[in-house]
Image (tube, grey):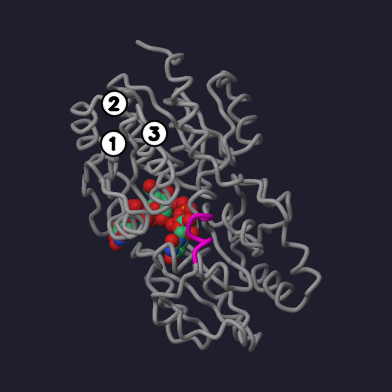
Amino acid sequence: MLKVAIIVGTRPEAIKMAPIAIEAGRRRGIKPVLILTAQHRKMCDDVFEIFKLKPDHDLDIMKPRQSLFEVTARLVRKLEKVLAAETPDIVLVQGDTTSTFVGSLCSYYLKIPVGHVEAGLRTYRKYSPFPEEINRKLTSALSDLHFAPTATARDSLLSEGVPRRRISVVGHPVIDALLHVASRRYRFASEQLAGIDFKRNKVIAVTAHRRESWGESFEGMMRALREIVRRHSDALVVFPVHPNPNVRGTVKKILAGAERVVLVDPLDYRDFVKLLKSCSFIITDSGGIQEEAPSLGKPVLLMREVTERPEAVKAGAVKIVGTDTRRIVSAATELLKSEKAYRKMIVKKNPYGDGHAAEKIMDTIAGRLGEVERP
Ligand code: UD1
Ligand code: UDP
């Protein structure tokens, strides 16, 4: 029996690891151990419920208004215990959160091999995104098997000296999760969303949460949203607001009560995917949404200065608009007014994969784990 521990901390990790946990559970000879750090509480619980997953260990670390220091310290203490007790054959971590980095660090201290899902994403800007760029670089340094979603990600790892035989280009498991949810007929559970007329309004789905934008840039982003609906009477913003209090405060300050701006609590993944399918386009700073939107044929305006996901930009599905109010308003106006500009952003093929990443990851683990360096 190969014991595969899967660490999940935040909402995007839960969504992206769900297909892998399900695939591991299906395979004979593999025993998955699902470790939920619960760096995010409700947002992870919601995802686990949708994918019918139950954690084997729930470290329950989230505290309101947690700092990076507190999260890191709590993770180190709790992950040491659970990993030392389980002694898995490999630990899988995903992406670039603090749970990801500390999960790989603790595994290394215990001399347990690490597999990194979504490996090789880079901006090469230390503080953008913060702290994710450094989290993923540190995770790469600690990993033994690197599951790169694309050839670009593989090339970044190669350029940093990661041996080719340790890298597998497998696509992105977020597409596995998305296709699983998007293929089912579904009615909105949220009453607020069920009440929206998606035919009469051009609905713009919005999310924003990045730490490096907090403060002035974030206020500029929120003012842009207010200005877009003020200028365009057919536009309606639907904005599930991230629970981080630093985000919520600014969103409420600038957008509460604005006409044709619908602020809702974070949506569960089924509702959110339906919102993406039903909207006209998306304005976001999210990582995962840049990967999902091309599969649904929805243009993305990205409120960031750089992205570690250049494939979707190159394909034309994502446009970087930064955090400046005027630039965001002007890009949204173009999509609202020009059918040609809108159509240009709908791509045929999603560069992030075909929905079979989880299988490829489990095949690689079964085939290559024996080759990784041992102490
Ligand atoms: C975290 C990740 C970020 C990722 C994002 C995805 C780090 C440092 N940051 O940012 O990389 O892109 O998740 O969403 O790893 N909260 C709740 N309920 C929840 C979840 C969060 O109330 O279910 C609130 C709590 O007050 C919590 C705060 O949000 O203290 C911040 O959570 P945290 O995980 O530290 O940072 P995020 O900004 O969510
Ligand atoms: N998402 C969701 N509900 C929401 C907003 C986002 O389920 O209200 C999903 C989204 O489809 C994507 C993931 O959460 O898969 C992105 O998470 P987030 O933006 O918090 O993190 P990031 O991807 O930026 O790390």
| CB within 8 Å, label 1 to label 2 | yes
- Boundaries of the magenta span: 178-184
| CB within 8 Å, label 1 to label 3 | no
According to the image, label 1 marks what residue?
33
- Image coordinates of residue 59 in percent, x first then y, are 21, 44
Mark drawn on residue 130: none
Sequence-first tag of 2 and 3: 3
Q: Given this view, does label 2 or label 3 mark the residue nearer the observer?
A: 3
- Can residue 214 be seen at all in this image of the molecule? no
Q: Residue furthest front?
A: 28
Residue 180 lies in the magenta-colored region: yes
Q: Residue furthest top?
A: 375
Badge 1 local density, few (<14 within 10 Å), some, or many (20+)? many
According to the image, label 2 marks what residue?
88
- Quadrant location of the C terminus? top left
Q: Amino acid at mark 2?
A: Pro
Query: Is residue 132 rendered to the left or right of residue 28?
Result: right
Using the numbered discs, state the Cα–Cα distance from disc 2 to disc 3 in whole angstroms. 16 Å
Say which quarter of the image contains residue 236: bottom right
Q: Amino acid at mark 3?
A: Arg
Whether label 2 lies within 8 Å of ligand 1 gets the answer: no
Residue at position x 44%, y 69% from top?
Answer: 271
Q: Residue furthest right?
A: 340
Residue at position x 47%, y 66% from top?
Answer: 272
Q: Amino acid at mark 1?
A: Val
Between 212 and 206, the one nearer to me in the picture: 206
Mark drawn on residue 27: 3
- Image coordinates of residue 263 in percent, x first then y, are 43, 77
Sequence-first tag of 1 and 2: 1
Q: Given this view, does label 1 or label 3 mark the residue nearer the observer?
A: 3
